[in-house]
Image (cartoon, helix red, strand yellow):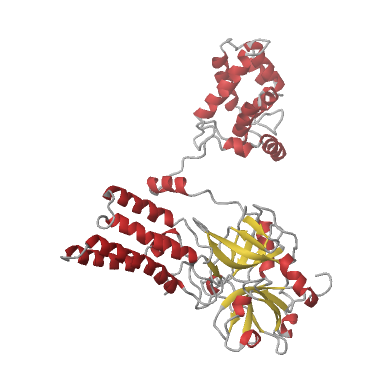
Amino acid sequence: MSTPLVPAETEALVEILADQAATSFAGPQRFFKDLVSRANLPRNFRAAVAGVWTGDTSVDARALLSWASQRGTNPTDPSVTVLGALLKGLLPDLGLEQRAEVSAIIYRRQLFNDPGLVERLVSGMQVPIAAARMDTSGAAVDGHGPDIDWRGTEDAVQVQGLLRADPEWLDVGFLSRAIARAAGVCRVEVGATGARGTGFLLRSRDLVLTNHHVIDGGAGGLEATAKTVQFRFGCMTLADGGEERGLAFATHVDTPLLKSSPTAELDYALLRIAPAILEAESLQPAPLRLAEPLGKSALHLLQHPFGGPMKVAFSSDAVTDVLGGRLVQYVSRSAVGSSGAPCFDDDWQVIALHHAERSRVFGVIREGILLSAILPEIRVFLPPGA
Amino acid sequence: MSRRIVTTQTQATTGAAQPLDSYFDRVIKYIPADVVAAWVTVRGLVIGAAGVPKQTVLWIAFAFLLAFTAYWTYRNTKVPDKPPATTQIIVATAAFAVWVIALGNPPVNWNALYGSLLLIAFTLASGVIVPKEG
């Protein structure tokens, strides 16, 4: 059921029709006569407007719109109203902007009765976009959205505009890959010292890589301290703000510590988890990448800052330097408890083991040990092809 | 708490972990406030004393406190398993000299304005220095 044109729409159509008539090679009167004849109207309708054209384009356009608006559905072609039939015939002669505007009016006033016809109009003319260029009263507000009734403080909004960047678009596929990788990241809880850090599963699924300094400092030495370590997977924030307990595993009874390098060197510790972890098939390791990252490439951290629930720090343009094929320095966000976190590239492959932060003149940079430096030392413990 | 400027920190949640020192933290840690306080006291005593060669005594006190600043900073920044905080020792010792100049005559016969400007410039610039030994 069509609805009447509002004054702003009438004025917009009058302007378009008058413009077309004024620039028609055949002249204004011929233009209107031709428009009516192309509309597939009944003979008596055509006769009613024959010979009424004055030559004044605005007057004739307004008269035609007024007459057609009163006629309802076209008896010859019920798929359109009479006004819709006239505008349908007009569309091919219009430029893109005018065509979009007329299409929006057809769509909004339901001048086409056939849903298929409406659908073709909508898809072909991007009608919702064009329709949005008019407010609810039909007033032309080209290039603007609806009038938002803002109730907040104007000053605060303007200050936010100055100081805050627009929210970032994050690709959901990218996020889902991050979530998948989180399954292989654990919190390392050292019973002997109370220290907490982060670690991640390696390909054999019962090995965790973390920092040497995370398990260092126990009274009985590294091996004895390693026996008191617990790995907690899936430790995340719950909806009520609490912390999910996750799945906890102890270290292997006989060989908890397979290999390590002092904090001043490669600062890693390779720990073996109790065999029970092999039954938890949801815990999957992330793929490793041995190539050195390029400068300004992205680097993302899955970590347990402050020993709390797992968090992710996304950082594009993160990598500032690669030092001696051993260290990578980057701008990101971490805290105590983040030691041992896997550093991912944009493909969510682990490239480094996060371990420290360093002051710069203004600000702080983070540092990780490249996997390409660590892996030759621990490859013997990994399955072939890992 | 150690006065040593922390510029590198591993990130496990152990009791030893300290937050990194920012620019403002470094500015404060470079100033040997206790030695400067000692200098102000000594200077006041000497100026108020009668029958002593004030310039000579103050220069001797200055030399002693300058050396003491280096030793005191070394002692207060010593941390097991880390090298001496050489950068901090040098900057703190220089900072003491700048404070003495800024506090003015005697013993340093300098325009007080220049001394004050030097102190402001040195203090602000010192925070930019990030010790490698951190």
The image quarter containing residue A301 is: bottom right
The image quarter containing residue A228 is: bottom right
Q: Is residue A235 left or right of residue A252?
A: left
Foreground residue among B81 and B68? B68
Q: Is residue A347 left or right of residue A107?
A: right
Note whether residue A10 is visible: yes
Q: Residue at x 64, y 56 (%)?
A: A321
Foreground residue among B129 and A39? B129
Note whether residue A72 is visible: no
- Examine the rendered structure and indicate whether residue A17 appears above or below residue A209: above
Q: Residue at x 66, y 57 (%)?
A: A172
- Examine the rendered structure and indicate whether residue A138 appears above or below residue A246: above
- The residue positioned farthest toward the right in the image shown: A384
Q: Is residue B93 left or right of residue A8?
A: left
The image quadrant where one finds the C terminus of chain A is bottom right
Q: Residue at x 56, y 11 (%)?
A: A56
Foreground residue among A163 and B72? B72
Residue A195 spot, x, y in % from top left: 55, 79
Residue B31 spot, x, y in % from top left: 37, 63
The image quarter containing residue A45 is: top right
- Examine the rendered structure and indicate whether residue A250 appears above or below residue A95: below
Residue B113 spot, x, y in % from top left: 28, 48
Q: How many marks?
A: 0
Residue A64 spot, x, y in % from top left: 59, 20
Foreground residue among A1 and A277? A277
The image quadrant where one finds the N terminus of chain A is top right
- The residue positioned farthest toward the left in the image shown: B50
